[in-house]
Amino acid sequence: MEAASGPAEPSEPAEEPAEALDRPLPEGVRRRVVGLAADALGGIPAGELPASLRQYAKFTPARRAKYAATALAAALESEPAFRVRIADRLRLGQPDLVKSLESGAVPSAADPMDVAAAAYLLRAAGWTRLVADAGEEADRADVEGAVAEAGRLVEKLQAELAEARAAARAEQERHRADAEGTRREMESLRKRLRSLESDTRRAQAESRRLAGELEAARTVGTAERSAAEGEARRLRHRVTELEAALEAGRRSAREGRSVEDMRLRLLLDTVLQSAQGLQRELALPVAQIRPADLVEAVSPGSASPNDVARRGLAEDDPALLDQLLAIPQVHLVVDGYNVTKTGYPTLPLEQQRLRLLGGLAMLAQRTQAEVTCVFDGQDLDVPVIMAPPRGVRVRFSRTGETADELIRRLVRAEPQGRPVVVVSADREVADGVRKAGARPVSSVLLLNRLSRS
């Protein structure tokens, strides 16, 4: 055949039958026709192509089918020569199909779309019928596919609906069970709440009753505690008195007659020193033990003072103290803190003691008087470490005893007729020592005398 020996010459366009489609080319047929034209476009010289397709000549067949589909379809419809060239290419590619169509026979095994596309390009007799049948076949296939797809979708939706209904029933059952459990739990909680309310009311009533009993017991306890405290104070006072009496009895038993002998000897020394001539004739030794030495305390020293005239001297005149200390065998007892807190209260207690004892030491050295300085020791936390100055006896009161009580004991320890001068601004101390025969003077008097030294 000549077709096998070389490329076929394009046949002249024949007289086209007066057949035409009564509706647009089916989409499936159109895609096949455009695909055939896109494949054959590369083998046609550019000068023989329609002007609208020349720009796509260098594209690959796939890109021509994608980007030039509309232009190819329009050229095939409006350019018979171009359609004939594409048909000639089809004869070379599918000669059996073309021969069958040109002879009026349609291959039963051929794809309807290929048959319709070839008929459209060849324009053989009855081509419109073949194209229409292919379109109807494609539409029928599309409808059947859509129906099958719809059936599958319906089945899927029915399965999903069944699953949703089953899930809804299960969820409903679960909610119903939860609601029943919640209802039972709420009923239990209501019963428990009623029980708790009843318990709360009983507890409140019991609390009120106990509060009343507690208040009554507190009132009784307060009264009993007050009575017990009063009785305890009375008993402590009585115990203190008994202890003092017992201590005095023990001391008297220990000292025996020696205390009375000492008192008489001291009184005799006072009389003898008042009468200097008699003392020289008798040549009696001076007593070495003083009654104040026998008064128990914590250690860290005759004319009556009342006979000294006071009309010519003021109570704060230092000369008055000089007259009192000039009395033979006079004993000067000083309320230490009473004097220091009157004269220099801003100093620390240790500095107050040192300053007062320094002044008293100089006073004792000048007057040769017996000097005892008493400090309150009941609030001491630790023992006081100090060296008493020469000529001054330093005493601290015992625990539970004030300095005022120690001063009164010192005065009572002296024999009747011994001149004793007590320095204190405390009126209670002054009244007490005055009844015991001592002469009280103010703290200001001693401070004035010390400041003059």
Image (cartoon, rainbow, N blue to C red):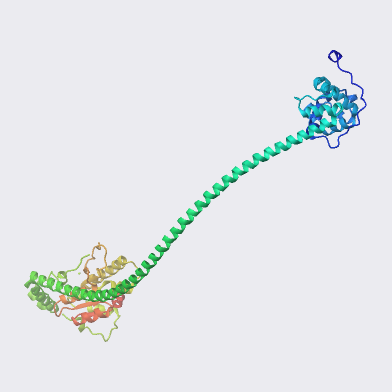
Q: Can residue 336 be seen in this view?
A: yes
Q: Can residue 346 be seen in this view?
A: no
Name the spot of residue 412 as percent of width and height, x first. Answer: 16, 77
Q: Which of 202 and 428 is in front in this view?
A: 202
Name the spot of residue 65 as percent of width and height, x first. Answer: 79, 30
Q: Which of 446 and 28 is in front in this view?
A: 28
- Left or right of residue 31, residue 278 in this image: left
From this view, report whether residue 87 is shown above or below residue 378: above
Q: Nearer the viewer, residue 109 or 325?
A: 109
Screen quadrant of the N terminus: top right
Residue at (92% x, 22% y) in the render = 12
Residue at (57% x, 45% y) in the render = 163
- Left or right of residue 138, residue 9 in this image: right
Hey, which quadrant is residue 227 in on the image?
bottom left
- Left or right of residue 420, residue 263 in this image: left
From this view, report whether residue 10 is shown above or below residue 73: above
Q: Nearer the viewer, residue 32 or 332?
A: 32
Hey, which quadrant is residue 3 in on the image?
top right
Name the spot of residue 411 as percent of width and height, x first. Answer: 18, 76
Name the spot of residue 85 as percent of width and height, x first. Answer: 87, 24
Total number of numbered labels? 0
